[in-house]
Image: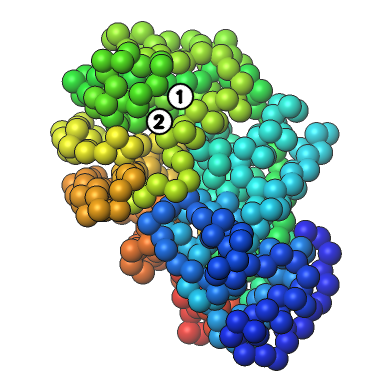
Amino acid sequence: MTSATTIAAPAVAPDRHGLEVFAAGLGSPAYWPGDAGYDEACRIWNAMIGRRPALVVRPKDAGEVAACIRFAAERGLPLSVRGGGHNIAGTALCDGGVMIDFSTHKEVEVEPSTGHVRVQPGAAWVDVDNATQPFGLVVPGGIVSATGVAGFTLGGGFGWVSRRYGFAADNLRAVEIVTADGQVRRASAEENPDLFWAIRGGGGNFGVVTAFEFAAQPHGPEVVAGLVLHPMARAKEVLALFREATAKAPDGLCHLLIMRKAPPLPIIPEEAHGAPVAGIAVCYSGPPEEGEELVAPIKRFGAPLADTIGRKPFVAHQQFLDAGQPFGRRYYWKSEYLDALPEAADETIITHATANASPHSAVLCMHLGGAAARVPEDQSAVGNRRAEFVFNVQGAWEDATEDPRHVAWAREFWSAMRPFSSGGTYVNFLTEDAEQERVRAAYGAALYDRLARIKARYDPDNLLRSNQNIRPATRD
Ligand SMILES: Cc1cc2nc3c(=O)[nH]c(=O)nc-3n(C[C@H](O)[C@H](O)[C@H](O)COP(=O)(O)OP(=O)(O)OC[C@H]3O[C@@H](n4cnc5c(N)ncnc54)[C@H](O)[C@@H]3O)c2cc1C
């Protein structure tokens, strides 16, 4: 999406006819409720979200994005943007407005000699990994490969290699972005630096990004990675192992604690299927022989129900959690950043993890820190980057009649963990019910207030508000 044609929004009312006239003027695919293709375009990862846009547009270039923005602004219509459609709060969907849908824009271009990677706004991490890993390059992505690059990067974005290379946003070099006034701009350290600062963490509040440019880093393609699983009866020891391993880990080594009911996978003995388990997943970014030595204590511990840790392609490791997080289930998350995972939290974690009634719910605690924490706090809008862990209670289930039970489990678990919180939370894990003070907590007062001033500059009327919203400051 590079060319920026200028298309004026027609002066018609936003009824069905007006929307049809507008969409026909664009010439790109558009869908209305009742059309073949509409339901598919509005199908996002979290089935809890039922908003219905009046019009879905798949713009072919930045000029058409600008036209959608102007049209929505002039008619006072809600506007939303879909990257990968993978957000827990489902902010890709708006009710009764225009949804810009990038789901068919997934191209990734790699320049192996410079590590420059250009990514279209509908790409998922699987698309980036498949394009970069053949050259032994990586852009720090998420731990589920179907997650969209766009929303992920704009909110910060961490994963298996973030302790070595920082957040995805730290590796962003430039974007093409259409701001709320319909202008197509470039933002980088040199061009519109205030905007570039804000979009690295501030989410979709500042414009619609039509291209991302990253600097990729060396990694893989073979890594030492995988998962060990133990019965929940040994959870206390697993927590101690996790604590010790994370305290000693070099930047290249990432650990992820996972507690859930054992899924019915062939790698797990049948008698354990459905029983609560406690596991540690690892990934080492560096020479495999070093990785093998570093993960030896995890592999040596106890008699695991399953142990998949070994040498493997990074792209395989990036996908091993995908099947547990499919599109179309009902999801409800609550999360906190933690500065430490003290022993005093063990009983709370084990009690609530064991009380989980869903075969799909889980609690995940990822070790952060490393290079991600050493970037100066004011270098970008990524909030809470000094936090050592992110703790995420992930409710997941199939049947809508079970909503209250699983939502209550996630909320009670999260409330019990709050005494151990750093006070911050991760903007990309906030649910639909997030209150404004949680958005502030995702940044802290200094970053939030600076974001609000930049928001006032680029989107004073808060057109872009289908997101974890940063309200424009009243005075710049
Ligand atoms: C299963 C799963 C695993 C995850 N794992 C991780 C993880 O390991 N690490 C991590 O950091 N996060 C993770 N996340 C959270 C993830 O970062 C967010 O859900 C993120 O919003 C996903 O991006 P998306 O493009 O798929 O979202 P979408 O739902 O498409 O969009 C969400 C919001 O992003 C903004 N947006 C999207 N595209 C654009 C654009 N082109 N221009 C401007 N704004 C845009 C809009 O405000 C939009 O409402 C995970 C999420 C899920 C569901």
Q: Position of residue 405 (x, y in %)?
A: 20, 50
Amino acid at dot 1: Val
Horizontal side, residue 103 vs residue 108: left or right: left
Residue at 22% x, 54% y is 404
Residue at mark 2: 256
Q: Position of residue 384 (x, y in %)?
A: 42, 51
Of the numbered discs in the image, which one, if any, rests on residue 282? 1
Residue at 18% x, 20% y is 233
Q: Position of residue 357 (x, y in %)?
A: 21, 38
Depth check: 179 or 476 in front?
179
Residue at 73% x, 87% y is 10
Image quarter of the C terminus:
bottom right
Amino acid at dot 2: Leu
Depth check: 403 or 125 in front?
403
Of the numbered discs in the image, which one, if any, rests on residue 250? none
The answer to whether mark 1 and mark 2 are in CB contact below 8 A is yes
Q: CA distance from mark 1 to mark 2?
A: 6 Å
Depth check: 354 or 367 in front?
354
On screen, residue 108 above or below 448: above
Q: Mark 1 falls on what kind of element?
A: strand
